[in-house]
Amino acid sequence: MIVIPGLLSGEQLRDVHARLDMANWIDGNATSGHQSAHAKRNRQLAEDDPEAKALGNFILDALAASPLFVAAALPLKVYPPLFNLYGEGEQFGDHVDSAIRIRAGSDFRIRSDLSATLFLSDPDDYDGGELVADGHAPVKLPAGDMILYPASTVHHVAPVTRGARRASFFWIQSMVRDVSARAMLFDLDRSIQELTGSVGPDAPALVRLTGLYHNLLRRWAEL
């Protein structure tokens, strides 16, 4: 699980909150698979809601501008971001995200390699609502931070017991399907970035490491 801190700034969050306050929330099972529908109790914006589309494009721009997201996900396709709301007593029980996501009314489809949750509510504004994934500590991040994790992971959203938790959620098809290969590339990329500042970009060892990174990506990437 990889945290992408500060994807949205405070000013951007204020704009998002103002627009979500005026939004039309519907039953969250509008996008549920068969198994998820039995576990899911929340609300969300309709996929064809003009406000949801505009906010989704806003988040896509923020993702494209995040070097950490690009390095971690190696994105080929990103499902247009969706938005959900958990009030008191609402939750999403254990489930695994659908392997293929198809946008209704279009030919857009992706293989969901990675799932993402962008937290939009301040943690002090609600109790509960943690994202809990198999084998990992519960996740409850500051507003504007995002968590990225394999879509194959069994996970749930704990019941909200006070306040309201709003978030954006979506899926990514990576250029590199294999989780371990993607993790190795991410570690190698981070090492290259750290070494660049200390030895300089023209150091022979760094040139070799950069070449190794691109040759591995060339071997594993599916376009």
Image (cartoon, rainbow, N blue to C red):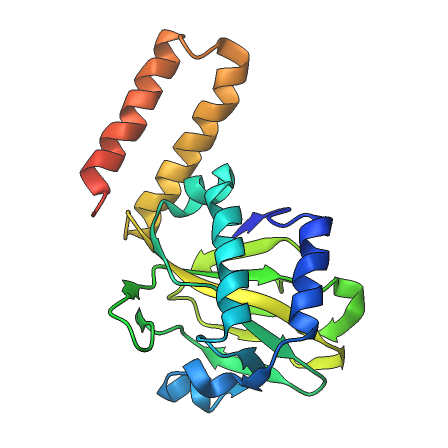
Please say whether residue 203 is visible from this viewpoint. Answer: yes
Question: Considering only vertical position in the picture, is 200 above or below 29?
Answer: above
Q: Position of residue 109 (x, y in %)?
A: 28, 66
Q: Position of residue 15 (x, y in %)?
A: 69, 58
- In the orientation shown, which residue stands out farthest toward the bottom? 38
Is 29 above or below relative to 194?
Answer: below
Relative side of 138 to 162, left or right:
left
The quarter of the picture where residue 213 lies is top left
Q: Nearer the viewer, residue 34 or 46?
A: 46
- Return the residue found at the far front: 50
Instruction: Choose between 90 and 53: the one closer to the eye.
Output: 53
Q: Is residue 136 visible?
A: no
Count numbered badges in the picture: 0
Query: Could you tell whether 173 is left or right of 46 in the image?
Result: left
Q: Nearer the viewer, residue 60 or 74?
A: 60
Q: Residue at x 28, y 66 (%)?
A: 108
Residue 162, compared with residue 138, is above or below; it is below
Say which residue appears at 39% left-offset and 87% top-offset. Answer: 35
**Where on the picture, by quarter, is residue 37?**
bottom left
State the residue at coordinates (40%, 8%). 202
Image location of residue 46, percent across then percent down = 49, 79
Using the image as rendered, state which of residue 80 and residue 156 is in the foreground.
80
Image coordinates for residue 131, horizontal then vertical, percent: 59, 68
